[in-house]
């Protein structure tokens, strides 16, 4: 049974809100039973209704579908709110540098991360997994099928990001990380396990920017992602 225009807009808004990835018109048509032409008209109205300054969330057309985003002018207050909800997570400088590489290159394998950073990152990866700032993302379809890593929902929430497209510039990353992770009081000392695995000591504040810049330059490396066994 067809819905009224208001009911349809509400249903589409709920679907987009519940989805982690952009929702296509085809997907919406399959679950609502409405014609695509009707859906597109309703979506145009929904996008327009969330565009006003009195709304904190907007619906955008992106990557062939529709997705909800927090508006840029509210990012700072969202970050402060999320930070207040969660206890600070201190990271060592090697962990911060590795997180920057993963954030800008993702998904990335351990060998790719180590090639960019020039040191063994196994201990740091373990730390980031334990702190739930990164997660696995299947395996790369190359020899050895190494595990791929990407940033997690926890990372997105701590940074107040609705989407990876909202990642800050490389220049802003370290300061934003300090604010988002509660490390304004200083970078945590290198943990024994990290030091033993990498053999590195504390590095300069600019290193994370260089690592992330290298990751951005190396992004797009070949290799197909396959589900993790």
Image (cartoon, rainbow, N blue to C red):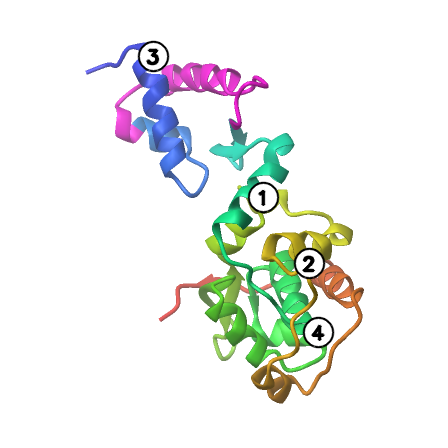
Give the x, y percent position of residue 74: 60, 33
Provide the residue designation for mark 4. 117
Provide the residue designation for mark 3. 6
Q: Taking 36 as reference, is 47 left or right?
A: right
Of mark 4 and mark 1, the one earlier in the sequence is 1
Label 4, label 2: how far apart the Cα atoms are: 24 Å
Of badges 4 and 1, nearer the viewer stands 1
Mark 1 residue element:
helix
Of mark 2 and mark 3, the one earlier in the sequence is 3
| Numbered marks: total | 4
In this picture, is 178 found above or below 59? below
- Return the mark for residue 184: 2
Magenta segment main secondary structure: helix
The region drawn magenta spans: 30-57
Verify whether residue 47 appears in magenta. Answer: yes
In this picture, is 148 found above or below 48? below
Of mark 4 and mark 2, the one earlier in the sequence is 4
Mark 4 residue element:
helix
Image marks 4 and 2: residues in contact by CB distance under 8 Å: no
**Which image quarter is the N terminus in?**
top left
Image marks 1 and 3: residues in contact by CB distance under 8 Å: no
Of badges 4 and 2, nearer the viewer stands 2
Of mark 3 and mark 4, the one earlier in the sequence is 3
Q: Which residue is pictured at 36% across the width and 37% down the height?
A: 18
In this picture, is 106 found above or below 166? below
Label 2, label 3: how far apart the Cα atoms are: 47 Å
| Neighbours of disc 4 within 10 Å: few (<14), some (14-19), many (20+) | many
Q: Quadrant of residue 52?
A: top right
Provide the residue designation for mark 1. 80
């Amino acid at each position: 049974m067809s819905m009224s225009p208001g009911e349809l807009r509400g249903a589409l808004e709920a679907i987009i809100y519940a989805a982690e990835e952009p929702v296509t018109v085809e997907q919406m048509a399959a679950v609502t039973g409405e014609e695509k032409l009707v859906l597109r008209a309703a979506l145009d109205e929904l996008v327009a209704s969330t565009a006003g300054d009195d709304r904190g969330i907007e619906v955008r057309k992106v990557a062939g579908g529709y997705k909800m985003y927090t508006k840029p002018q509210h990012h700072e207050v969202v970050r402060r709110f999320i930070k207040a909800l969660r206890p600070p997570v201190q990271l060592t400088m090697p962990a911060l540098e590795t997180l920057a590489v993963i954030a800008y290159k993702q998904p990335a394998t351990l060998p790719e991360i180590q090639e960019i950073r020039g040191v063994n990152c196994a201990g740091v990866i373990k730390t980031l997994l334990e702190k739930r700032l990164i997660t696995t993302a299947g395996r790369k379809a190359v020899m050895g099928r190494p595990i791929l890593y990407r940033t997690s929902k926890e990372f997105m929430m701590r940074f107040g990001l609705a989407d990876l497209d909202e990642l800050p510039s490389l220049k802003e990353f370290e300061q934003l990380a300090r604010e988002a992770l509660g490390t304004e009081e200083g970078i945590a000392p290198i943990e024994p396990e990290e030091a033993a695995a990498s053999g590195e000591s504390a590095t300069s504040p600019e290193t994370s920017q260089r690592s992330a810049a290298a990751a951005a330059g190396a992004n797009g490396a070949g290799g197909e992602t396959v589900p993790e066994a």
